[in-house]
Amino acid sequence: MKFDIMRDRLLDGLNDVMKAVSSKTTIPILTGIKIDVSTDGMTLTGSDADITIQTSIPVEENGEQLIHVTEPGSIVLQAKMFNEIVRKLPTNDVEIEVADHFQTRIRSGKSDFHLIGLDAAEYPMLPEISPDRQITLPADLLKSVIRETVFAVSTSESRPVLTGVKWQIKEDGLVCVATDSHRLARRKVTLEHLPTEEANVVIPGKSLTELSKILSDSTTPVDIFMTNQQVLFKTSDVLFFSRLLEGNYPDTSRLIPEEYNTTVTINGKSLLQAIDRASLLAREDRNNVVRFSTLTDNNIEISSNSPEIGKVEEEIQVESLEGEELRISFSAKYMMDALKAIDGQEVVIQFTGAMRPFIIRSVHDDAILQLILPVRTY
């Protein structure tokens, strides 16, 4: 195998696939990156067995030659070392040549590295994916869906299925739900083209976070394919595979109240800032709790009390306040996460009582719903 490539494009590709490589893998060859070179261009693959990322670099793009292939072939190179070498090469022209026994030579300017590679035939094959359960979302919308749900997944491995986000495709579109059993984030997306089969999968939160780093902020379409064990996100030059989580995801629909006793409409940004200030005094050992109380004349009070430090109270004017009086305590962090997901818009908060879950939605858009369980403070 022998080819020349532009260093900056090789680095871009390595940045993507390195997100899937882990030094903790039990399969030694997965500490490497697989490089395939053909007359069409180059493919880089990185994997930790849970996530697999493959990116392609064409021979030419917009009339510019990116790769010059002398002899096609494949090799697996130690990921961390290869990435560091490419990052520090002196010029933008890189020549890579593989000789007998996987001896690999990397040259750029006056630098000349020799690495021992591994047989690419030993590298695991990519899973087969069928197009029966396929949907397409623009990259920027997919990023938003991830941002608005993934923060609510559980960080505890005691119930592994809760460390993922449930994606369900039904006749009215895609519904994404995350919960750690203290809070819930739900995002609905209307789909232009429904797949031939319904789907119900749980995607690890970690996979979605890594995917989000790779996606662009453009409206480029991302094709999403689901099977029983894997999900594939496919853009024009990247394939991102993730294994799915096994187990029964709890039925979260019954957690969402049907009727409410108190409804508050408020500016999300000013509420977020007030809770942020109150949380400065919220005691760490009490899970960072703040109290929310309704007052008269369309006012609410956000307060926090810490016997060792002091207390804070702040009144906020709200757009509207309907229903019963209420005093409720909740985790400042959970409330701030929920308000950030709704992104500073006008929000409606609906309560059914001081010890019942309450929901937060945008006034303009009910596609995003956040639910939080209050904290008992007496």
Image (spheres, rainbow, N blue to C red):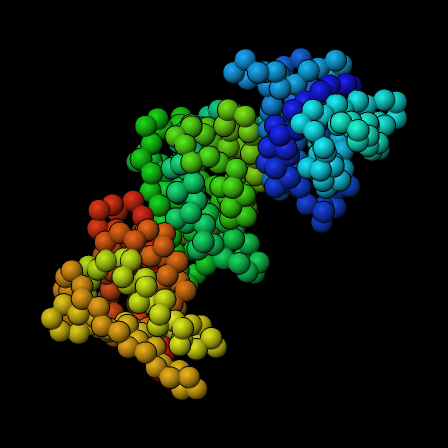
Q: Is residue 246 above or below residue 199?
A: below
Q: Is residue 84 above or below residue 265?
A: above
Q: Residue at x 40, y 86 (%)?
A: 307
Q: Residue at x 67, y 27 (%)?
A: 92
Q: Is residue 26 above or below residue 226?
A: below
In the picture, measured across the screen, residue 347 lies left or right of residue 337, that is left
In the picture, measured across the screen, residue 284 lies left or right of residue 107, that is left
Q: Quadrant of the N terminus?
A: top right
Q: Residue at x 39, y 71 (%)?
A: 279
- Please indicate, yes or no, whether residue 278 appears anywhere in the rendered image: yes
- Please indicate, yes or no, whether residue 120 appears anywhere in the rendered image: no
Q: Residue at x 22, y 46 (%)?
A: 364
Q: Nearer the viewer, residue 124 or 219?
A: 219
Q: Position of residue 227 (x, y in %)?
A: 52, 33
All told, the count of numbered labels is 0
In this view, the residue farthest toward the bottom is 307
Q: Position of residue 337 (x, y in %)?
A: 39, 58
Q: Position of residue 173 (x, y in %)?
A: 33, 35
In this view, the residue farthest toward the right is 101
Q: Is residue 112 above or below residue 349?
A: above
Q: Nearer the viewer, residue 320 or 14?
A: 14
Q: Position of residue 196 (x, y in %)?
A: 40, 26
Q: Quadrant of residue 19?
A: top right
Q: Quadrant of the C terminus?
A: bottom left
